[in-house]
Amino acid sequence: MKKILIIIFVLLLFGCDRTPNGKSYLVATDATLVPMSFMSVGNTITGFEPDLMRAIAKEAGLDVQLVNVEWAGLLGGLITRKFDMVISSVTILEERKERMAFSEPYLKSGLALVIRKDQEGIKSFADAKKNNFLFGAQVGTTAYFSLEKDPSIRKKGYQMYGHAVADLINGKIDAVLGESTGTLFYQNKNKPLFEKVKMVGEILTNEHYAIVINKEDTELKTQINAALEKILKNGTVSRLHRKWDLGLAAQVPE
């Protein structure tokens, strides 16, 4: 009986600790962009990035829980430690490095321009700008930052990429600038949302996506990078790239 009690005590003390330090890490993602991160049937967070985060966690021996957070609250919530990491197609930017840390990149991607199919003669971003288009973009993203750099560009900010596309379809704006991953996925799959719009020109920028971590969490960053390096080398990331049909929208770093 005494031996049984000792076993139960040990299980209670250590049994719930699924990670070496007994910590469960909260990882935030904006689950509104198919196929990167979105809510599936049953209210489960799924997509390329949730799959990637779970693969990294498994390799590193970490326990992670994914939580859906609107884009506007992601980086601020990380800084105030509402959660431990962010994985949500966040581009590595020098100005962001001043306040937060980044893992090594897990994808290379960029921005793409979408217009209505009935807009003739527009073949590029330069054409749209020349025609004084009103551009829509998700606030806080590199798409919106790029529009802000040129005061002559007319722009409108949105909390969600899909809302901008809806306004484009309804004629409230003239074009949408957004991540190529989501844009090309919808286009290639002929989703209903994209029946009346089209992507024009090439992918406009060269960006690198990474997991965002608090600057003070240097040990966690080391663990994440070590695990990411392993699953890049063993082909796991490439398999997820194919699973979610990212195609030319994004490339796996070599």
Image: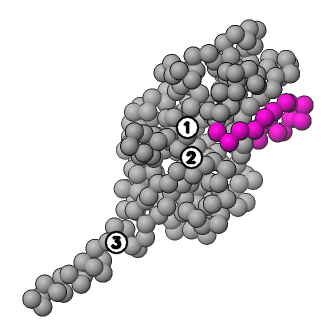
Q: Residues within 10 Å of mark 1 (few under 14, many from 20)?
A: many
Pinpoint residue 189: horizontal percent, then vertical percent. Answer: 48, 21
Instruction: Tell me which label, 3 or 2, sits earlier in the chain.
Output: 3
Left or right for 181, reference 206: left
Residue 58 versus residue 131 in the image, above or below: below
Question: Helix, strand or loop at disc 1?
Answer: strand
Q: Is residue 158 magenta?
A: yes
Q: Which mark is residue 30?
A: 2
Indicate the amino acid at tag 1: Leu
Magenta-drawn segment: 145-160
Identify the residue at image location x=41%, y=56%: 57
Toward which corner of the image does residue 102 lie, by quadrant? bottom right
Please report whichever mark, 1 or 3, sits nearer to the chain's N-terminal start. 3
Q: Which mark is residue 33?
A: 1
Amino acid marked by disc 2: Asp
Q: Tell me if 63 is positioned left or right of 114 in this view.
A: left
Spatial CA distance of label 3 from label 2 is: 27 Å
Q: Residue at x 70, y 27 (%)?
A: 167
Q: Position of residue 152 (x, y in %)?
A: 90, 31
Query: Residue reaching furthest left?
Result: 1
Mark 1 vs mark 2, CA separation in Å:
7 Å
Q: Are marks 1 and 3 in contact (CB under 8 Å)?
A: no
Q: Residue at x 18, y 87 (%)?
A: 6
Q: Could you say which is closer to the camera, residue 33 or residue 150?
A: 33
**Residue at the extreme right:** 152
- For mark 2, give the secondary structure: loop
Q: CA distance from mark 1 to mark 3?
A: 32 Å
Determine which residue is flagged by label 3. Answer: 17
Check the image and report above or below for 161 versus 81.
Answer: above
